[in-house]
Amino acid sequence: MTSEIAVMNKKAVALAADSIATLTSSSGDKTYSTANKLFCLSYNHSIGIMINNNSFFSGQSWETIINVYRIEVENTKIRFNKLEDCVQHFINFVECSNLFDISFQIKSALKEIEDLHNKVYALLSEDLINHFESNPGISYTKNQQIDFMKNRMEELINNMEKKPDYINNFDDFIQSHQEEMDLIFSSIYEHTYSDLKILINQITNLYFNKMVNPYESRIVIAGFGDKDNIPKICSFLIDRAVLNKLAYIYDFETKDCAENPSIIPFAQKEMVDEFITGINPRFLDYINNINELNFPEQADDIYSLIDYYSRQNHINPIFSTLEYLDKPEMAMMAEMLVNLTSFKQKITNELESVGGPIDVAIISKGEGFIWIKRKYYFEADLNPHYIAKCYK
């Protein structure tokens, strides 16, 4: 997990990102504090890009993809009237840039579906064994066992159907590679495959067409298009590329602060929510559960009183001040909000999945993208050619 923050009012948007990358393996989690998650689109545009969650996509690091995109933007000298134009251009670039080998995309997609159904079959087998153990002395026919597995698969399908649909549809890929997938399914489900085939295909279809994978990448693009007078921010989630089509959804398409300033946390939000509302979200859930259990008739009134107090004494004062904050204070606020989560993890027994140097940038209409804090893995004084390249 990571922590990124956007703080936005009508003057500017401040972006802050920690440097922790968490690698999960069979031996446990390991963290590194050197990841780059905040990038300048180019010094000719007032736009920044942040990445969150999975830092790799189709075998490439997002850092490399964004750097290649920057070169493309600078070489073509393209301009964006609105931030939304940049978002769509970036998505089109990732789809059409030929950065990702088609055969690798197909191989990866088939491997994903194989891993998914291995997990599904293992879950079905475990549930079946547990069911037998909880009902000793009762024998079940093959048809009864199949019915049990079907019920479990239908529950899984119902949960998957609740997930949002990707912008693109991947039925054409499923149809064109059905034979390869049939071989995969028959080797996993063996003698039960013919009985479960319809449900297996439903799960496969949902997996390819809905955001059910928890390892997606979040891309945040923020700043000003040439004709934008107030900053905007867009967030979208990308899962995979299949046949050069992106499996993605919008977290939110665009937000601006035409009416109210914004504080937008990504990933770990608990400490930011606590700072803004004055109460820890988990503690608030605990209080609400107690109220509903012990005072069901008054629960809604109690919740309204808590919410009123929070707004009057915490939320409203913060946002009324944020509306008039200048750029240095916004940058300091964004950095502090990332630090809150990092500090809490440091003094508790939680995995330190937020931390390391914090990169901070301010994007405004006049100055464009300005680094406030930026880590380097090298000494800037020893690499003047790099600085010259950035500001050529």
Image (cartoon, grey):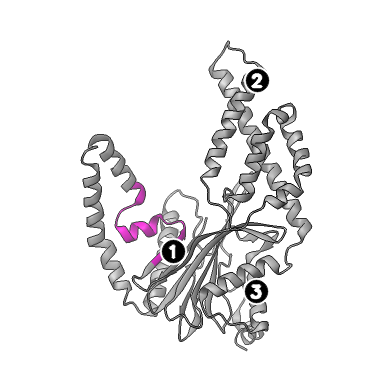
Q: Nearer the viewer, mark 1 or mark 2?
A: 2
Q: How many labels does the image show?
A: 3
Pointer 3: residues within 10 angstroms few (<14), some, or many (20+)? some
Residue at 42% x, 74% y is 331
Q: What element carries label 1?
A: helix
Mark 1: which amino acid? Val
Q: For this view, does 246 lie left or right of residue 367?
A: right
The residue segment tinted magenta is 263-283
Residue 110: % across, % down = 73, 47
Disc 1 and disc 2: Cα gap in Å?
Answer: 55 Å
Marks 1 and 3, the one that precedes in the sequence: 3
Disc 2 and disc 3: Cα gap in Å?
Answer: 55 Å
Q: For this view, does 299 lie left or right of residue 377?
A: left
Q: Name the residue under label 2.
A: 143
In depth, the one of 148 and 171 nearer the eye is 171
Pointer 2: residues within 10 angstroms few (<14), some, or many (20+)? few
Residue 160: % across, % down = 55, 43
Figure quadrant of the C terminus: bottom right
Q: Name the residue under label 3.
A: 69
